Image (cartoon, rainbow, N blue to C red):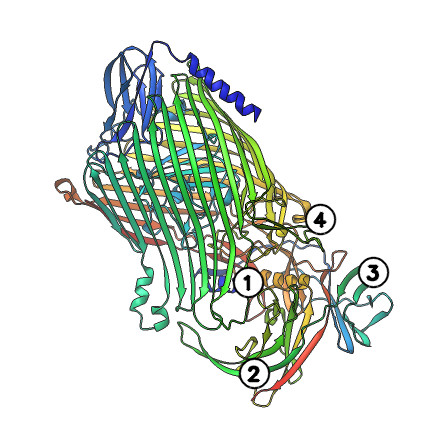
Amino acid sequence: MTRFFLLVTFIATCFSYGFSQKHTISGHIKDASNGEELIGATVKVKNTTTGVVTNVYGFYSLTIEKGAHTLVFSFIGFNSVEKQIDLTENTRIDIELTSGSKNLEVVEISDTRADENINGTQMSTIDMNIETIKKIPALMGEVDIIRAIQLLPGVQSAGEGSTGFFVRGGGVDQNLVLLDEATVFNASHLLGFFSVFNGDAIKDAKLYKGGIPARYGGRLSSVLDVHMKDGNNKKLALSGGIGLISSRLTIEAPIIKDKASFILSGRRTYADLFLKLSNNEDLKNSKLFFYDLNGKVNYNINERNKVFLSSYFGRDILSIAGEFLLGWGNQTFTGRWNHLFSDKLFSNLTLIASDYDYTLGIPDGFDAFEWNSSIKNYSLKNDYTLYLNTKNTLRFGLQSTFIDFNPADFKPLDDNASFNALQLPKKYNLEHGIYLSNEQRFGANLTLDYGLRFSLFQNIGTDTVYNFDQNYDTIPGNSFTSYKKGEIFNHYSGFEPRIGLKYALNDFSSIKASYQRMYQYLHLANNSTSGTPLDVWFPSSPNIAPRRADQFAVGYFRNFKSNMFESSVELFYKDIHNAIDFKDNAQLIFNRLLEGEIRIGSAYAYGAEFFLRKQTGKLTGWASYTYSRSLRKINSLNEGQEYSANYDRPNNLSLVASYQINKWWQLGATFVYTTGLPLTAPTGKFVYQGQTIPVYSERNGARIPAYNRADLSVTYDVKKNAERRWKSSWNLSIYNVYNRKNAFSIVFKEDESTGEPEAIKSYLFAIIPTITYNFKF
Amino acid sequence: MRYLIYLFGGMLILSSCREKIDFDLNDDLPRLVIDATMSTDYKRHKIEITKTSSFYNQQEAEKISGAQVTVSDGTQNIVFNELMPGVYLSDSVAAQVGKTYQLNVTYQGESYMASSSVFPVSQLDSIVTVQEFDTIPIINEVDSTYSLGIAITEQAGLGDYYLFKYYINGFLESDTIREYSFTEDTFIDGISFDFNPLISVYQIDHDNVQSGDLITLEIHSISEDYLDYLAAVLLQTEFRQGTIFDGPASNVGGNISNGALGYFFVSDVSRASTNIP
């Protein structure tokens, strides 16, 4: 802890020298049409390199010399605003920018547009505006943030149709997915085909692949920070869409004009509603659907105080003939108070709750049962940003989270049931984090963002911890240890340094480097290729040490043609200590001895990422190519030899383009090529008790054929839109245009009728055309 | 109950499309495969030894002749003699509960070993066959089967594992692992079952039996390790359908040393019979 106190002293020192003949300009930058705060908009002093970017609340604070200045406020796709000021005292300037795109024949290229790519210290990060995501051809017409993210460099998908994603060689459980700061434990709907993020309710998503700021912790590989819209505070607005598999409706309106607003957004799939039309009773009683609801209320109490409450509730339901029921979903709740202590000190106090649970059961009969599992967390967080001066921006804060695991609670529903109830020990934990970072400019070219996070994880009773020997068997006579309620019986902690460096070579290019250390105390027991709803999360414990990742990255960033094109090359190396995998044929569900199924080792990943993006003009989009490897070495697996992770795909190419033909027509296209997933292929077989069983030699030693696919979309904004308030558009999307049967998996087995051994590939989606009608009012 | 989840996995199989493809495979060196079971029954016990083959091979597994096969309980040595190629039989003998048996196979100078302890089994009181008509949801097909129900008192204390086998007129019907019924006692520990409600361990297809046929059910005590082995066999074969629920492909490792495949287990056995009404 001494190191932390040193840092506190350091902040105090920074405070004391900050007062010269300078004044602070601060305020919010918003979208003039609906009052939504703009994240990542820039404020620049004209003809200098001095400038700042708005934070996730659209807030900025800039401290400069007193006197006359011209400030330029800009944001991609919006018309820039210049403002002359004579700075004599601390000033508040709130700006509303008007959208520049749809009103013009050709999208203007603004020469003052954001060049954050070059100037920010943050590397390995991609900000995705929902409008960009909406231009990408969508599977079954569902606009999906995670699918868009999978097209970025350094991000891989688990396989066709899956919204699981893997960042720089990290597993799916190494992503911290936040929705308005609340952890989303399983971001999938419908067995992974869709993500829980409803495009209509989302404003912005930012993915950190590296150089993760000190304010985030708890996951090794990435942070996906998703923000919900605040709701229109100017006027009532309705929007929605009718698609082949789902419909959406969003209502947003001011409660008090310019001060308070709300948004309520819902989505439901309805494939199962057709089942109701069936004459078959069983089909009528079957269900397969998901829905989700997003809601948010915002209130700007005054210039210094702002509160919001936001919540998400989503659920998937699968029921077969009313005889079997499976349901799962996430719920999140966030309450937040933004407070400005001064023009320079911005604070957030946040209360968060989130829950992922599933329930499975047979509702009737003597074998009726119900099986529940959940992971809940409750968190209190306090974050500060201190815009000390133009050279230093300090961020500090702390967070405490209580995590409650219910791995499995199985109970018969019939009094005369022929089986017993089973409750696996619940787990209670506390996870704390405290951090301090400073973004400091040294001269015109060099900026450093350095910080330290300290994390602490505690196991709390009541708990039963099993004791294992070297062979992962429980120790006879001493098989478990019990702990009393409230007793903190084990803890882990660690320092997590984070360093980012930017060196501007000139106005259009820079070099960046970063190092980060992350600890992860929660782990996911899942060894299928793709996620299933039946996730079992488990905490670090006396048997399972936390995982630790160190990542180094360097990059070269260059913009061309007045920032019309941005490009980057990044190299990374990631090393994971205490990586986990599961023993062969592990039993991960209903297993009180789950910890005995885990095998510990090391993992590493490295890669090179190339990215070229065009953000303005009629043609926008990006090209991304990644070469990366993700390898593991785990004791007792693969005979102790190194092997490829299940999601290791060395080559990854994505092309995304969107072309605005005129005011009404827009085309979208995507092309994806990746190396096939690793495959463990048999090197023989044997027969035991009538069963033919394959023999394998090397884990993940072969590969499924390479994956490639192209998608197209056409959007037509109805011509009459210009004259009326009701605006509508049609979208036709074609997934997998050339109907390639991309192998999802290959299994080797004997044909059931002939007994002939054969290789069978499974593929999920052939060509899928979808039409969607969208409206706005 | 333990592997219930795989059942649900099966129910959830998406309507993914499948097609046969050509996929070249490499072959590894052949390994010995030993299928060795003994029980507390007084009889001639059988051990079969074969070899692994290349995956696409369509011939029957190659038999291993000329191996020396013995099982020892520490004091007594039971010799298995080769009766026909790859098939080794003991003289009549019964294993005893509580003892640990050691298998020793010597072939071409290499020695392969395994051991198995005999745990007591819960005694079957009686069995019954009840005709049932099940309607398969959605397709509305009526399936007529006999449920093979058991009356048994499961011995108290967690950690018992059972394998069931059944015979029609003395012929083993459940003769491959995919047809085996096996369980642990997590959900049934210490419970007495009579026929109400009916706990069915097998469904016998109506077409396979006639009135008066003799049905015999055996319950074997097995180890947790062997139960895991059987489950792993199913995971790597029957449950491996190429869906998103498949776990990683991996070897099914048995309890035999020196790289041989297969399993050696010795069980306590209890049985009961009934006639199809």
Q: Secondary structure at mark 4?
A: loop
Residues tagged by mark 3 and mark 1 found on one chain of the structure: yes
> x%, y% of residue A430?
51, 41
Q: Residue at x 60, y 71 (%)?
A: B191
Q: Secondary structure at mark 3?
A: loop
- What residue sits right under mark 4 in the picture? A470
**Disc number placed over residue B129 in the picture, else none:** 2
> x%, y% of residue A667?
29, 42
Q: Secondary structure at mark 2?
A: strand
**Disc number placed over residue B239 in the picture, else none:** 1
Question: How busy is the neighbourhood of tag 4: few (under 14 within 10 Å), some, or many (20 plus)?
Answer: few
**Disc number placed over residue B108 in the picture, else none:** 3
Q: CA distance from mark 1 to mark 2?
A: 28 Å
Residue A445 in view (yes/no) = no
Task: State the residue in front, B211 or A402.
Answer: A402
Tell me the quadrant of the picture where the C terminus of chain A can be found: top left
* Residue A177 occupies quadrant: top left
CB within 8 Å, label 3 to label 1: no
Residues tagged by mark 3 and mark 2 found on one chain of the structure: yes
Question: How busy is the neighbourhood of tag 3: few (under 14 within 10 Å), some, or many (20 plus)?
Answer: few
Q: Residue at x 38, y 12 (%)?
A: A19
